Amino acid sequence: MERLLVDADRARLGEVTSFAVGDLYSAYCGSAYRVELAVEELFVNVCRHAYGGGKGPVEITRELAPDGEGGEMLEITVADRGRPFNPFTEAPVPELEGELAGRRVGGLGVHLVKTMTDGFAYSGADGRNETVIRFRLDG
């Protein structure tokens, strides 16, 4: 397992997405894009909301393992010690229909994470939020 510890600062976004993606673009281009987009969304949400505008710690872990079907599965965890928030149950449901200008803001990023990953979970205990996303890697 690889680990990166950064402040919840949007200036660190490039470092975070580079760490999460690693060398996936060389072998798993389609999956790499999904990983980059999902991690960006989760990290930016932590930067905006977890610490009330402050810059507390964010830990990102990355683990690659066999998926049991002859392929590989990438698991990324984004953890913080900010206010408790389960993005998968507490984020607003986005409006996906109708004119863009008339839609309510919120929830679209989490919707993208849900649809672009092959698994997701949240846990919160002992003052720590952990959001886990999984990707079955394909070429």
Image (tube, helix red, strand yellow):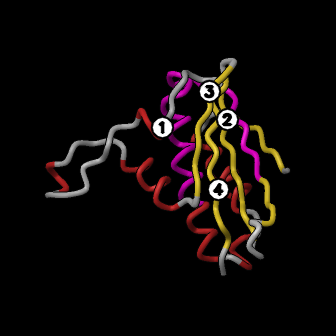
Q: Earlier in the sequence, mark 4 or mark 3?
A: 3
For this rendering, which residue is in front, 86 or 103?
Answer: 86
Per the image, is 14 magenta? no
Judge the density around disc 3: few (<14), some (14-19), many (≥20) Cα neighbours within 10 Å: some
Relative horizontal placement of residue 40, taking residue 96 as reference (left or right): right
What amino acid does circle 2 point to?
A: Ala
What amino acid does circle 4 point to?
A: Arg
What amino acid does circle 1 point to?
A: Pro
Q: Which mark is residue 134?
A: 4
> Which residue bears the numbered disc 2?
79
Q: Residue furthest top?
A: 126
Q: Residue furthest right?
A: 1
Judge the density around disc 2: few (<14), some (14-19), many (≥20) Cα neighbours within 10 Å: many
Q: Distance between the Cα atoms at labels 1 and 2?
A: 13 Å
Q: Distance between the Cα atoms at labels 3 and 1?
A: 11 Å
Q: Distance between the Cα atoms at labels 3 and 2?
A: 9 Å
- The spot of residue 101 in percent (x, y) is 16, 52
Please give the range of residues in magenta. Answer: 36-62
Q: Are marks 4 and 3 in contact (CB under 8 Å)?
A: no
Relative horizontal placement of residue 75, taking residue 88 as reference (left or right): right
Q: Earlier in the sequence, mark 4 or mark 2?
A: 2
Q: Earlier in the sequence, mark 3 or mark 2?
A: 2
Q: Nearer the viewer, mark 3 or mark 2?
A: 3
Q: Which mark is residue 87?
A: 1
- The spot of residue 96 in percent (x, y) is 25, 56
> Which residue bears the numbered disc 3?
124
Q: Nearer the viewer, mark 4 or mark 2?
A: 4
What amino acid does circle 3 point to?
A: Gly
Q: Earlier in the sequence, mark 4 or mark 1?
A: 1
